[in-house]
Amino acid sequence: MLKIDGVILKQMIISGTNNLYNNYPEVDALNVFPVPDGDTGTNMNLTLSSGTREISNLDIESIDEVAKVFSRGLLMGARGNSGVILSQIFRGFAQGLKGKSSATAQDLADAFALGKQVAYKAVMKPVEGTILTVVRESTQALLDNVTEDMPIDEVFDLLYKEACESLKRTPNLLPVLKESGVVDSGGAGFCKILEGFSLALHNKIVERNMPDVVESSDIIEEDDELETELPTQYCVEYILDLSKNPKLSRKKIFSSNRFLSVLSSHSKSLFTRKEDNQIKIHLHTDCPGNILTYSHQFGEFRMLKIQNIAVEHTHLLKDEIVKKNEEESKPKEFGLIAVGVGQGIVDFFKDLNCDYIVSGGQTMNPSTEDFVKAIKEINAKNIFILPNNSNIVMAATQACDVVDGVNAVVIPTKTIPQGLVAAMMYNPSVDFEANFAEMSEAIKSVKTGQITFAIKDTSVDGVEIHKDDYIGIMDKTIVTSCKERMEALKQILNKMIDSDSSIITLIVGEDVTNEEKEQVAKYLEETYSNSCDIDIKDGLQPVYSYIIGVE
């Protein structure tokens, strides 16, 4: 086969999407930071699935049209930095195929080369040893070796082979990868996509692996092929006391791998901690009843909490916005969008005059489309976006680029404390330039620390970390790892606070007990009250027990 059309490209895309879906948990596991929200594979999976959903019912032979529709779906569904870069690769790829009904080997090589160029331009400070390197080196190998009469299957075999070789070299380019003993996660995800493309050309289209351990009555029916990629509505948390004698209690024998495989296939943002005969679960799903029915087969619930995050977080302010726009059809001058998760954090931003809260953050990165929807719903001439996470900045920026008629800009807040300080400086009564300058300047004065737990043994930046340790992260650097959470908090506070510090803001997560919070308040009062103002807030955020802001 010397040419491919849109029909074949569609088959390749579906195969590549399914291959990534089948392997995204292992891509997640490659994240250098051993934190529970390592989500490169998840973000790439959701991004790619968004593009595939757009072409799933497309019956067009033109490769130009299929590539264009696929690219648009990726662009709007892009989540996290890895997802945005992936969308830009295929944006350039689609541009390279413009006007073509079919593509030769040379056409495809040129299209990938353009994809590489577009992706590099989208990143303000490209870092080698990442997905960008894998794309660049594999594409260059293609350009160096392709001939006009090369069979298409050989083209993608070569591209996949060279991408894998480039991936192996990523630890030599990024010391943090070598220290952690992993390859780049974004590059690994890209290789999985190319592998699926190549297999499809060899008549081995990859199918989705669905768990074979679940009876249809146990859990979710798969009515929609891409059901798990749709936005989830409920946050579910529970503690399950596993049966010590399954036969006597008429419970099923618990297998950790099997149990987590089922839950991960039917939920997002899954985090678990198992101690002795007890397992604590946190996840997001559309069907909490089915999840709980399945889990109940293995034990009894000790604690159970379900929250409707779609209602409580993403659209908390929807009614107010709609009502205001009905009263005043003309767009207002300014609008403010913030990203946050945790009822307390959402309320903080609401109190600081944010017009729209996009649900997400450490545990769930919103898509470009989420930001586009928020921009359109606010109905303002000028809009500021506070992403509050370094992995969300690119998706927010991409949304600003695709929305017409609105001057939407991103204030590059990378943490919740930065976002809160920026929101405090927001003043709708002054002009755009003054607002932008004040908010951008304010975030420079904030240091951020976070306390969470480690999900694996590793070494990062010289810090030895063991699974289930509590780790302290200061501005994206792990600075401490301890067996006790209180000790980890004390150590990171000691590193963050100096003679120039005047304000300490401690945002408490949902897993912290009142007793522990009182101990922390006492420690802060005794240790730092003479030199700093102390503000303790209930953020109720998942995963991160404490978020610390120091000004």
Image: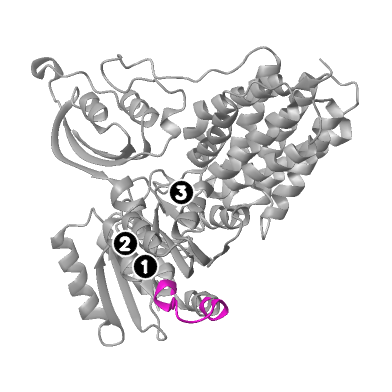
Secondary element under disc 2, as helix, strand or loop, is helix
Could you tell me the amino acid type at mark 2? Ile
Q: In the image, residue 525 lies at what x, y percent? A: 21, 79
Which contiguous range is marked in magenta? 422-435
Q: Can the viewer see residue 183 in this picture? A: no
Residue 402 vertical position relative to residue 182 in the rendered view, above or below: below
Judge left or right: residue 19 versus residue 260. right
Cα separation between marks 1 and 2: 21 Å
Q: Which residue is mark 1?
A: 492
Q: Which residue is mark 2?
A: 345
Residue 350 vertical position relative to residue 181 in the rendered view, above or below: below
Label 1 close to label 3 by CB (< 8 Å): no
User: First in sequence: mark 1 or mark 3?
Assistant: 3
Q: In the image, residue 375 lies at what x, y percent? A: 49, 57
Could you tell me the amino acid type at mark 3? Asn
Q: Quadrant of the N terminus?
A: top right
Residue at image position (69%, 19%) is 7
Q: Which residue is mark 3?
A: 365
User: First in sequence: mark 3 or mark 2?
Assistant: 2
Could you tell me the amino acid type at mark 1? Ile
Please, which colouring scheme is shown? Answer: one colour
Cα separation between marks 3 and 2: 16 Å
Q: In the image, residue 145 lies at what x, y percent? A: 87, 30
Front in this rendered view, residue 33 or 145: 145
